[in-house]
Amino acid sequence: MTPVVTVEHLRKAYGAVTAVEDVSFTVEEGEIFGVLGPNGAGKTTTVECLQGLRRADGGTLRVLGLDPRTQGRELRGRIGSQLQESALPDRIRVWEALDLFASLTPGAADWRVLMGQWGLTGKEKASFASLSGGQRQRLFVALALVNDPKVVFLDEMTTGLDPALRRVAWDLVEAIRARGTTVVLVTHLMDEAERLCDRLAIVDRGRVVAMGSPQGLIDLHAPQVLVHFSTSAPDVDFLFRVPGVETVERRGEQVEVAGIGAVLALVASALVERGIIPTDLRTERATLEDVFLRLTARSQGAA
Amino acid sequence: MIALRRMAWVELKLFLREPLTVVFALVLPLIILVVMSGVFGNTPDPEFYRGYGPVDFYTPAYVGLVLAAIGVVSIPAHLAGNRERGVLRRFRASSVPLGVVVGAEALVSLVIALVSGVVLGVCAILAYGVGAPASPLLLVAAFLLSALMFAALGVMLGSLIPTARAAQAAGMMLWFLMLMVGGPGPPPETLTGVLGVLSHAAPLTYASRLLQEAWLKGGWSWADTGIVAAIALGASLVTARFFRWE
């Protein structure tokens, strides 16, 4: 199956400032693909080039088989888009916005159904200005879906939302995917990317520094596992002989074991073997944030 | 076509929900009519106004002034404001063609101009005894052509000026300047030197003359028509070339 999105060696500069140096990735049908990176990494520029909202300086781009540089208008009619820094007129009403955007696409989805799906029923006559941040976000998602797109681009959709609304927005993204729409999600939030994305590209200073599933990236770039427990047993040095264990540190009754692989199971079994049965045995895995900090620190060191 | 109709309809409703612009477009010309008629009366003076009564002479020019207000004051501020706030960006991302955005502006401004112009004309006829238009047909033609020109100018200004604030300031300045030198102010024959040059540069001068010719004499000036059409065309070309969505 051909990918929904293909980017090869995308390059984009604004005057003397290079926003995107060299970005390549593909997005397969039905997945949630994340573009993760710090502010100013070139994420937004990348997806705006993909939507033909900005003209790429170099590289090959294909979205749904179309070239955003020459077929931008046609492409934008077939994708959904939620943009940073966009708005509607203050006094436009929810139903008017949906009706207007639906009228732009022949054979658009029924916006009344969308309004129900995205929790806007009862708000049809509310003006855009009177909507809360979360309601606006839901309206923008509904507008992005009104042309029944095959792929949606969501750019920092949870920025400015409080933690509770952020969770609601995450459910929205999963609901979009559940209806069979491919999602390209731009974010600088690690927990968001880890929770939602099937695969992601970490972008830093205009380049892709890593790509894969969140777990795959963690396994590859931050494979260390920490095991914590407490015990009154005087000697735990036997743990050094457990396969995969790299360090054992003890502070009073607290013990921290660090290693790679199935350290938790092996440490547990070694402890039980010696009659030590801690009640607070727990493990701490690296998160995407550890991967991210490691990778972006490296690229900063190289710069 | 459906998109253009919907967009124009929504824009019209948005306009009506904006009290300040409604007052500006509909009420200000009436105030000017009332004040000016109070000052000048409508007794014909053979030395000025080509022998017409001042209110007779000015009413068509005030109609032009309404068109200018909508064109150079409301449209640029509206367009630039939509750009500044990211509304145009939102439209573009949903593949709204430039023609729909611009066409809706033009249609809405035409509708508002029509209402405002009719109110003004009827008030002038009923309250001040201004004579009915000598040629209603030519008057409508002059009106449409002038409205088109000012809409094109407004869209051009809205395309070139980045912020709503700047657009509003520039529009107001132009509008007041045209009020003074473009027909609704001192009679053209008293404008000499720099004022005469400004008068020739003001688009309203030509719109006023077209409207006056049609209203007062049932006449038509092809020279003025050419100038008005050229301005409209030039402004449209500038828009097509320099329009910025963001």
Image (cartoon, coloured by chain):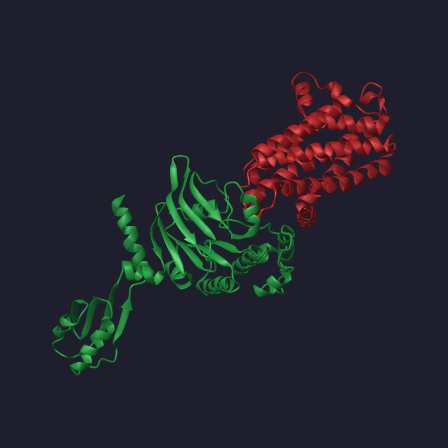
Chain colours: A green, B red
Q: State the image coordinates of residue B226 (x, y, percent, origin top left).
A: 73, 24
Q: State the image coordinates of residue A102 (x, y, percent, origin top left).
A: 63, 54
Question: How many marks do you count on the picture?
Answer: 0
Give the residue at the far front of this rendering: A1
Image height of A233 relative to B45, above or below: below
Task: Name the residue at 75% across, 32% down.
Answer: B145
Task: Name the residue at 12% across, 73% down.
Answer: A237
Task: Name the residue at 47% across, 44% down.
Answer: A49
Splitting the image into 4 quarters, where does residue B31 fall?
A: top right
Q: Is residue A39 left or right of residue A177?
A: left
Q: State the image coordinates of residue B192 (x, y, percent, origin top left).
A: 69, 17
The residue nearer to you, when weighing B52 against A11, is A11
Give the residue at the far bottom of this rendering: A275
Image height of A150 relative to A8, above or below: below
Q: Is residue A297 visible?
A: yes
Splitting the image into 4 quarters, where does residue A128 fall?
A: bottom right
Give the residue at the far top of this rendering: B193
Q: Is residue A214 left or right of residue A273?
A: right
Image height of A250 relative to B189, above or below: below
The residue nearer to you, when weighing B235 against A102, is A102
Q: State the image coordinates of residue B176 (x, y, percent, origin top left).
A: 66, 31
**The C terminus of chain A, quarter of image:** top left
Q: Is residue B180 visible?
A: no
The residue nearer to you, when weighing B157 against A102, is A102
Splitting the image into 4 quarters, where does residue A139 fall?
A: bottom right
